[in-house]
Amino acid sequence: MKTNTMSYKLKQYLLFAGVSTVIFACVVIIPFIYGLYLTFTSWDGVSRNKPFVGLTNYVNAFGDTGYWTSLGRTFIYSAIAVILVNAVAFIIAYMVTSGIKGQNFFRAGFFVPNLIGGIVLGYVWKFVFNKALVEISQTISSGQAKSLLATENGAIAALIIVSVWQYAGYMMLIYVAGFMSVSEDVIEAAKIDGCTGTQSIIHISIPLMTASFVQCLFLTITRCFMVYDVNLSLTNGDPYGSSALAAMHVYNQAFINKNYGTGQAEALILFIICAVIGGIQVYVGKKGEVQA
Amino acid sequence: MENEKAARNKKIRHALMIVFLSILFVAFVFPFIMVIINVFKVKADITANPLALIGSHGFTLDNFPNAIKKMNFFPSFGNSLFITILSTIGTIILSSMTAYLIVRNDWKANKILFVLMIASMVIPFQVLMIPLVSLYGGIFGVLNHRVTLILMHIGFSLSMATFMFHGSIHTNVPISLEEAATIDGCNKWQIFSQIVFPILKPTIATVAIIDAMAFWNDYLLPSLVLGRKELYTIPIATKVFYGTYSTDTGLIMAALLLAMLPILLLYLFLQRYIVEGITAGAVK
Amino acid sequence: MKKKLLSLAMVAAMSASLVACGGSDGKSGANGSGVSITILNSKTEIQTQFEEMAEEYEEATGVHVEVYNADTDTTVASQVATKYASNDPYTISMVDAKDIYSLADDYAYDLSNEDWVSHTTLGITVNDKLAGFPFCVEARGILYNADAIEKVTGKEFDPKSVATLDDFQKLLDELKAGGMETPVGILSEYWSLGAHWFPMIYEEQADPDAFVNGLLEGKEDLAGNEKYNELMDTFETLVKYNYAKGSASNADREETSMMLAEGQIAFMFGGNWDWSVINQYDYTEHLGMMPVPQNTSDGTNGKLVGGGSKYIFVDSSDATSDEQRQAALDFLNWLVSDAEGNAFLTEKCALVPAFDNIDASALDPLSLSVKSYADANNLVPNYNYLPDDHMTVVGQEIMQKYLDEAIDRAEVAKEVTEYFKTATPIAH
């Protein structure tokens, strides 16, 4: 069978990826190009005419100090959240695959946070931060305590805590699948060769799980950079707009301040930054991947 | 002697792990417990003291029937189920095939597709929102159909699913197995469907949970595509309880509990599948 | 496996096409009489009443009405815009006053020739086109719980007796001495501070438009402005007695409303729409609304601030057929001229009507207060042309700090002045 002719390649491509390509192009690529076009207009998001204005929106975006501040904040938030989410998820995943009693029960429990979204999540956590924790700290220190959500750094810390809570169970899923795919035989063989538990994790499991790490890191990085719903339901930018992350700023710019073009341009800048960071991470990670 | 000592160490280690996990566990399920506590209270009691087991207005089950009636629960549930199942199946089949093509063939077209897919995962949805409805509503007029939503769901989730399958085909599917099959006279499609796909079980289960959950809970895209009440999915229907000036917390919690059950069941079911995956993986 | 996969795909495809055929287009109308219209309701607290009304309306007239609830995650304007982008607009959209100005030219049908026009002065006209139908009247002021006050003071509470800040202060001290340590609640939400409180500083100027233009041009001296200082004096007093003082941003709307309803606090800044939250709690009998107390001589301390609120426009685009448009116009007429329509507005939804022919006596206590001020012509009109980001910048970035006592009055004036220099004016 000739496997390098053009027609063979085309047939294979259409068979395996034809439908995907068409759907992907229609749903993502084409609207994206249209969205790109809109950044060159001064459309307000509502009216019928979309006057072409060239690069004005990009100039505005670069001059929007609020945007760059929120972006800086997003970097700090993401860096901490990504590390914590993955550390917690990995540790949990390791423990719930180590054969302890009730591991299925634990797996279900850690997964539950994923099922609570939107306004309930914001409501419940607001209560935890504003009431439960305040009361506890007042009993301990017997003074007027401020809620985490009422201080500028505290609000970001609260966002990080909730993100860890929300994503750790999700990433645990992927790490669990990773641990499961490392076959028992390999671990057994390592043990016979005299590896301790920790050694076998570091030298065998982790290298074999590179794919899981690449996936989880990529997912957490991109999710953290684009986080919006938790930001909206938990802090909505309070206090003083100090906890508005980049996606929220972009959204407000486009829809509340009715600068659709500028908001769209800022979203694209966010996209490029995200794509570059995510891309580097995937590239580095894929290089380290072990081929079966 | 050695073995006994090892067994004892293992026991201690396991006990420590259980303690550690239990503490984390409480922190993780605490908000969920709050939901359960408060679903049996009227709104006034929820605001007054969310921690109280029973409020001053007493225990109530009214939130459930009220939520079911107000959000038109059963038709919405049917819509959600239909859309979620078809979107998930579609995504898994299409993305595993695409990932297989990309991993095993070092062609330029594949590389471009893969890079585009990875890049697309970081596009903020707001960028695509207006263009999407302008194209498919304004020009083609195909909104307000469940199939449109299913295709869009697939389109948006293909990238991540392909990305995940790419990783696991790369590391977990031994190329030697495929070479052997080729010698036995299998064509590419047979190799994929009979050898590769079954090995991918753990990843399939993971992708199924992640995507089904995302589809089940998605609000923004369905709300743009399904503008008619009879097509509403659960998340859109739940929005009746959210007001600018008043939010009916009791009803929202009831709706949340009713809506999360199918996903929880799916998760528990697929968990077993992931565990069984070990034996499937042992083919190598 | 191949077969399994294939059959799975087949099943998927088949059931998909089945639904595609069955997938109905709501516009074609379910019942015999044919016409079907859609309404976007952005007054989310009356969604239930709206839906019940729709059913009754269909029984009476044969017109099928679908009521859609506005999405609270986004703005009404962007929701309407999204519907227009997908060429699937609502027949009738209820939006905020300022949205009418941006939507009118392209999408609003001219309502000048309708029967109800002579009964209201609150409609919005854009470029000679009457585009906005006023849905109700709403006003801002101080909400009070008279029962809570009387319980402490032992004498009947007359809101007129605390029109000046000095008198108000005396009452607050009396309440404090009587055991109510913190008689005031201030919502920390930015829309309350930035869209409800701060705009009073412009609205109560002699010429609001000239004042805001002066700020936009950088010519106005806010720090030295009399109205600014009068209202800020009052705000500082409120802050001093705020129950959440020290952690003001913890005070959320639900809790503050509950405290007022139950009489744990006596005063709260808000509007008559707050009734929909208050009535969910065990409220005491005598609640009401009064003007914001001020040491002023211009008479504004005898007036609430407000006017027409929530405006309806009828779609003029091709996506709406002439029959649907006529049905929409009939519906608006029904609201104003039909006894059932009136009852829907005033009794079921407890709204203060914007039309002089509608009788409204069975309103909630807050709306009754608003109505009495409106009838006596004691409303300071809303100013609808503030820049779009005024609410977030002034409300969140500036006033929240002030509420937390992190910056002082001079700094507020300086930051607001700076903000206006770069703000985009609203054409009107």
Image: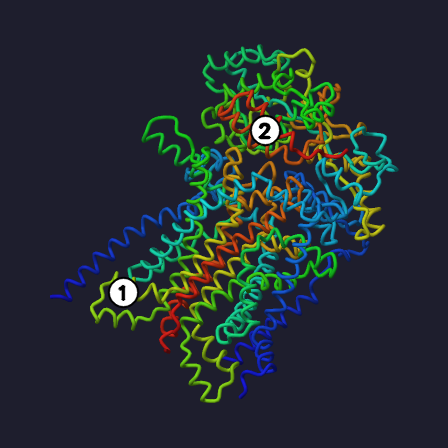
Which quarter of the image is occupied by the C terminus of chain C?
top right
Q: Which mark is residue A200?
A: 1
Q: Relative to residue B143, is residue A71 drawn left or right?
A: left
Q: What amino acid is at disc 1?
A: Ser
Taking the spot 66% from the left edge, 61% from the top edge, the residue there is A30
Residue C156 picture quarter = top right
Q: Chain of mark 1?
A: A
Q: Amino acid at mark 2?
A: Leu
Give the mark toward the camera: 1 or 2. Answer: 1
Dividing the picture into quarters, in which one does residue A108 lie? bottom left
* In the image, residue C175 above or below residue B36: above
Q: Which residue is mark 2?
A: C193
| Depth order, front residue of A52/C386 | A52
Q: Residue furthest right?
A: C113
**Residue C94's x, y, as percent?**
72, 40
Does the rendering let one see residue C370? no
Residue B100, compared with residue B74, is above or below; it is below
Q: Chain of mark 2?
A: C
Colour scheme in use: rainbow
**Whole-percent x and y of residue C389?**
63, 35
Q: Quadrant of residue C28?
A: bottom right
* In the image: residue C421, left or right of residue B31: right
Q: Residue furthest left?
A: B1
